[in-house]
Image: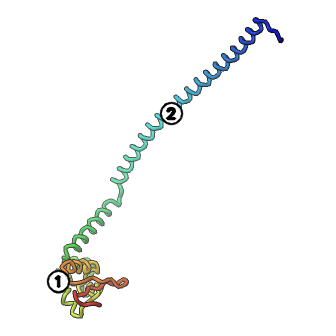
C-alpha cells in the first residue's frame, strides 16, 4: 500500500468522516440529554422554591395562631405591667400602699414607706456614711430604690456612692469611709 490509488484514499477519508459524524451525533445526543436534565432541574427548583414560600407562610400563620391562643399571654402581659409599674415607681421615688392591700397580702404589720426626701437620707448620714442595705431596712424599701435616690443626690453633688464588695455605701461629700 505504498502506492494507493485515489479511490483507496477516498474510502479512508469517507470512513473517517463517518466516524466523526457518528461521534458528533453522539455528542449532540448527550448535549440534548444534558440540556433536558438541566431544564427539569430548573423546573423542580422553581417548584421547590414555591413550596418553601408556601411553607413559610403556613409557619407564620401557625406562629400567629399559637401566639394568639397561648394561655401564658395574659400572665406575660400582667408580669410586664407589674415590671413597668415597679420601674416607674423606682424612677419616681414614690411608693404608696393601701391598708386594704396590706390586709389582702397578710402583712398587717406592714407600714407604708413615705415619699423619700433628701433630708431623710441626709439625716441618716450623721456619721458620714451609711450602707444602702441599712437605709432600705430603715425606710422599708428595696435596696435598688435607695440607690436610685442616692444617685439623684449624687447628681446634685451632695453625696458620693462607693462600692465595697457587694455593699453600696452612701457617703456625704467631704467624708470618706
Label 2 crowd bin: few (<14), some (14–19), many (20+), radius 10 Å:
few
At x 50% / y 32%, what residue is drawn? 42
What residue is shown at x 64% (from left), y 19% (from top)? 24
Q: What is the distance, in whole Å, between disc 2 and disc 1 at their CAs?
A: 74 Å
Q: Is residue 97 visible?
A: no
Looking at the rendered structure, the secondary structure element under dot 1 is helix
Residue 92 x/y as whole percent: 19, 73
Residue at 22% over, 76% down: 101
Q: Which mark is residue 165?
A: none
- Quadrant of the frame with the N terminus: top right
Q: Mark 2 or mark 1, which is nearer to you?
A: 1
Q: Nearest the camera: 101 or 32?
A: 32
- Of residues 28 and 6, the one nearer the viewer is 6
Q: Residue furthest front?
A: 3
- Classify 128 as above or below 38: below
* Snapshot quadrant of residue 155: bottom left
Residue 66 coordinates in the image, percent (x, y): 37, 52
| Towards the viewer: 89 or 155 | 155
Q: Which residue is mark 1?
A: 118
Secondary-structure class at tag 2? helix
Quadrant of the drawing holding the C terminus? bottom left
Q: Earlier in the sequence, mark 2 or mark 1?
A: 2
Marks 2 & 1, CB-CB < 8 Å contact:
no
Number of residues whose C-alpha sits closer than 10 Å to that of mark 1, classed few (under 14), some (14–19) or many (20 or more):
few
Q: Foreground: 160 or 92?
A: 160
Q: Where 176 sits versus 99, above or below?
A: below
Query: What residue is disc 2 on?
Result: 44
The location of residue 67, given as percent across then percent down, is 35, 54
- Residue 12 position by quadrant: top right
The answer to whether any part of residue 3 appears in the image is yes
Q: Residue at x 33, y 59 (%)?
A: 73
Amino acid at each position: 500500500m505504498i502506492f494507493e490509488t485515489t479511490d483507496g484514499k477516498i474510502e479512508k477519508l469517507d470512513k473517517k468522516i463517518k466516524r466523526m459524524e457518528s461521534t458528533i451525533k453522539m455528542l449532540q445526543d448527550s448535549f440534548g440529554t444534558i440540556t433536558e436534565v438541566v431544564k427539569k432541574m430548573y423546573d423542580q427548583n422553581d417548584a421547590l422554591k414555591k413550596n418553601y414560600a408556601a411553607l413559610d407562610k403556613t409557619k407564620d400563620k401557625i406562629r400567629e395562631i399559637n401566639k394568639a391562643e397561648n394561655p401564658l399571654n395574659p400572665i406575660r402581659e400582667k408580669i410586664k405591667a407589674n415590671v413597668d409599674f415597679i420601674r416607674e415607681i423606682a424612677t419616681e421615688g414614690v411608693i404608696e400602699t393601701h391598708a386594704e392591700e396590706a390586709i389582702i397580702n397578710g402583712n398587717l404589720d406592714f407600714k407604708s414607706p413615705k415619699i423619700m426626701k433628701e433630708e431623710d437620707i441626709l439625716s441618716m448620714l450623721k456619721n458620714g456614711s451609711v450602707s444602702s442595705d441599712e437605709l432600705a431596712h430603715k425606710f422599708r424599701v428595696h435596696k435598688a430604690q435607695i440607690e436610685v435616690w442616692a444617685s439623684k443626690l449624687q447628681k446634685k453633688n451632695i453625696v458620693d456612692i462607693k462600692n465595697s464588695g457587694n455593699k453600696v455605701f452612701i457617703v456625704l461629700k467631704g467624708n470618706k469611709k
